[in-house]
Image (cartoon, grey):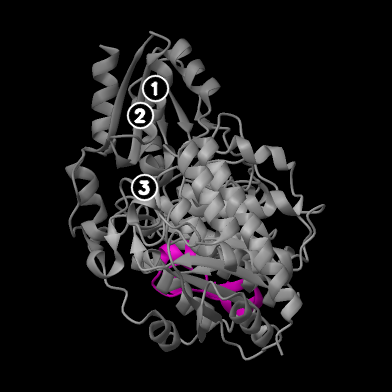
């Protein structure tokens, strides 16, 4: 499981997989909000026009149209950017999707700081946390191209609301093409019993690099890919806290209510161990290179290594 | 020609729906009588004549759908569903009670016959568009009916949904605007002027009608007219209505938007409906 490669964006994985799914099952629909080019659904719209709808720049309506289709047995993927898919249509998702537990998927590109040069307006850093509070919702972010493809497929097969988030930019390949994924079941990427690093999404490769540096220093860090933050794989978190006593969470999301919060909620109730959260420091981003924005928030290999060493002192 | 017998029968039926909903709101000690009464004639015409439905088979895929976008007036919907036999009529007395299938706003997962959960204004028309689109895409002949409030048209999403209905040529979508000129805080003209709603929906590309929403003959006549109209245009029927229609002390009184009648008021109201005033 190498991570030192250029890889592909996970929005590309979405575009390819949703087209495949649509060809296999005519009940799969894509509802675009005039961001089809950016969200990689153009192939779907061209090849499966009878399963495609573009409502224009009207996300709230897109969500409602999706809910109506779902009552008739369709499986709509409402597709837009993370900012709009979580916040512009938040109450529509609550009322018309989560409350009646309809089979609507909210599929969003440009998650976290990945639309770096677009600036704060387009960086969806609160999305997973906001939607995590809605009953009946499932929240997913794959960390690479192949895992995202599998998770998009899993979302389509699951009967109920799902929010699934993608990156704008390329992220390294981490998994092999054949790796299987299950919603709510975390993956262990590195074995280790001294400390655990739990990460997801585009930050997974940063976590892996930190673990490798720690390994060079003789520290065995367990690395977990928590691709689903709701329902959280509590078993894996509990195992990590009981077996390693220390957890560092790393995420491309606001430090409030994302992966780190979800993990902390589980750990706090055990009264055991310690959790340190690395993520966006409850501040808006700005137009800057992606790496620079990560640095400004301490989402770096070095900070993970330093935090681990401090905890292991 | 309008079928006179049908009009008479529906007019009589509407009286029963009104007395039923007044009684259930009284029993619940809360609810929305004003808007329920202004929408009664429209919803009665749909459930007791126009819609192709089977109360014994509420999830029948070929059925016509009804979306109560202004979900707070669900007593009118519940009365129609109860009287049509979707559930035991006695259930109507459980409105808003713990464990009831009759939630304060319609819940599709609890109440048979409710095609979509609503209650947050502005959202129902979008869901109706989704249902109508599905009929078009799957070459099915069912139609989708929807009721929105005039106050509800303050919500931008209503116009997003209308634009989408036009784009996709949804002539199988029929939405009524319950134009009673009152909203929660007072007159629409004071809170947020609606302007000429018929002109607005017409400009959005709808096949638009303006009728008296309490004149059963006009309602039936309009439904007759549009039933087989395949012109790729969504059907919008702007209905001039009176909030609290049929009850002397509720008509055009904004306070009756969300207040339950006590025992004496309820008896008075039912008498007004049955005997006229």
Tell me the subunit letter for badge 3.
A
Q: What element carries label 2?
A: helix
Of B83 and A150, the residue lying toward us: B83
Q: Is residue B238 left or right of residue B93?
A: left
Q: Do the residues labelled 1 and 2 touch (CB within 8 Å)?
A: yes
Among numbered discs 3 and 1, the one appearing first in the sequence: 3
Which chain is mark 2 on?
A
| Farthest-out residue, top | A271
Mark 1 and mark 2: span between their CA atoms?
Answer: 6 Å
Magenta stretch: dominant secondary structure: helix
Which quarter shows the N terminus of chain B?
bottom right
Give yes or no for residue A49 being in the magenta stretch: yes
Q: As rendered, which of A152 and B2 lies closer to the eye?
A: B2
Callout 3 secondary element: helix
Which corner quadrant of the image does residue B122 belong to?
bottom left
Residue A226 location in percent, x, y?
48, 34
Q: Distance between the residues labelled 3 and 1?
A: 18 Å
Residue tagged 1: A265
What percent of the width, then of the height, locates residue B12? 68, 64
Where residue B169 appears, x then y in whole percent?
58, 84
Residue B199 picture location, percent across and down: 39, 86
Give, as a single range, the part of the protein colored magenta: A35-63
Q: In this view, does A234 lie to the left or right of B47?
A: left
Q: Mark 2 points at which residue?
A: A261
Asked if residue B221 lies left or right of residue B142, the reply is left
Task: Tell me which numbered mark, 3 or 2, is placed earlier along the sequence.
Answer: 3
Residue under numbered circle 3:
A127
């Amino acid at each position: 499981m190498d991570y030192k490669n250029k890889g592909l964006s996970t929005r590309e994985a979405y575009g390819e997989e949703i087209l495949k799914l649509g060809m296999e099952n005519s009940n799969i629909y894509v509802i675009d909000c005039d961001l089809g080019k950016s969200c990689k659904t153009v192939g779907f719209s061209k090849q499966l026009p009878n399963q495609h709808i573009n409502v224009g720049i009207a996300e709230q309506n897109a969500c409602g149209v999706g809910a109506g289709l779902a009552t008739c047995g369709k499986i709509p993927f409402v597709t837009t950017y993370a900012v709009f898919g979580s916040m512009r249509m938040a109450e529509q998702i609550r009322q018309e999707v989560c409350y009646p537990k309809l089979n609507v998927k909210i599929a969003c590109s440009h998650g976290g700081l990945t639309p770096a040069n677009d600036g704060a307006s387009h960086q969806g850093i609160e999305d997973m946390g906001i939607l995590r509070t809605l009953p009946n919702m499932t929240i997913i972010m794959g960390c690479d191209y192949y895992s995202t493809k599998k998770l998009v497929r899993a979302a389509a097969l699951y009967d109920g609301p799902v929010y699934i988030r993608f990156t704008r930019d390329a992220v390294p390949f981490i998994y092999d093409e054949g790796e299987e994924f299950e919603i709510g079941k975390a993956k262990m990427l590195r074995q280790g019993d001294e400390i655990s690093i739990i990460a997801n999404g585009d930050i997974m490769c940063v976590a892996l690099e930190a673990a490798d540096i720690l390994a060079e220093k003789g520290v065995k860090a367990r690395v977990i890919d928590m691709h689903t933050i709701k329902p959280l794989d509590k078993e894996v978190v509990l195992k990590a806290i009981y077996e390693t006593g220390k957890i560092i969470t790393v995420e491309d999301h606001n430090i409030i209510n994302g992966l780190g919060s979800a993990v902390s909620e589980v750990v706090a109730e055990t009264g055991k161990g310690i959790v340190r959260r690395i993520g966006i420091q409850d501040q808006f981003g700005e137009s800057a290179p992606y790496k620079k924005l990560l640095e400004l928030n301490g989402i770096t290999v070095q900070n993970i290594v330093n935090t681990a060493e401090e905890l292991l002192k | 020609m309008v079928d006179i017998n049908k009009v008479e029968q529906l007019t009589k039926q509407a009286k029963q729906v009104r007395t039923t909903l007044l009684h259930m709101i009284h029993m619940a000690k809360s609810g929305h009588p004003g808007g329920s009464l202004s929408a009664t004639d429209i919803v009665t015409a749909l459930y007791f004549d126009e819609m192709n439905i089977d109360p014994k088979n509420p999830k029948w895929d070929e059925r016509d759908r009804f979306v109560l976008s202004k979900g707070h007036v669900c007593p009118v919907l519940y009365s129609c569903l109860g009287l049509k036999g979707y559930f035991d009529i006695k259930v109507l007395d459980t409105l808003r009670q713990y464990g009831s299938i009759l939630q304060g706003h319609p819940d599709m997962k609890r109440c048979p016959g409710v095609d979509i959960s609503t209650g947050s204004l502005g959202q129902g028309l979008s869901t109706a568009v989704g249902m109508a689109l599905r009929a078009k895409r799957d070459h099915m002949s069912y139609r989708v009916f929807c009721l929105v409030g005039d106050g509800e048209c303050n919500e931008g999403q209503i116009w997003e949904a209308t634009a989408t209905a036009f784009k996709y040529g949804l002539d199988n979508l029929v939405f009524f605007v319950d134009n009673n000129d009152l909203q929660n805080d007072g007159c629409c003209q004071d809170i947020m002027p609606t302007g000429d709603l018929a002109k607005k929906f017409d400009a959005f590309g709808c096949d638009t009608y303006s009728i008296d929403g309490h004149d059963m003959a006009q309602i039936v006549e309009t439904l007759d007219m549009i039933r087989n109209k395949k012109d790729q245009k969504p059907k919008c029927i702007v209905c001039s209505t009176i909030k609290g229609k049929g009850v002397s002390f509720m008509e055009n009184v904004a306070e009756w938007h969300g207040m339950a009648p006590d025992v004496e008021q309820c008896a008075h109201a039912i008498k007004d409906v049955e005997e006229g005033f």
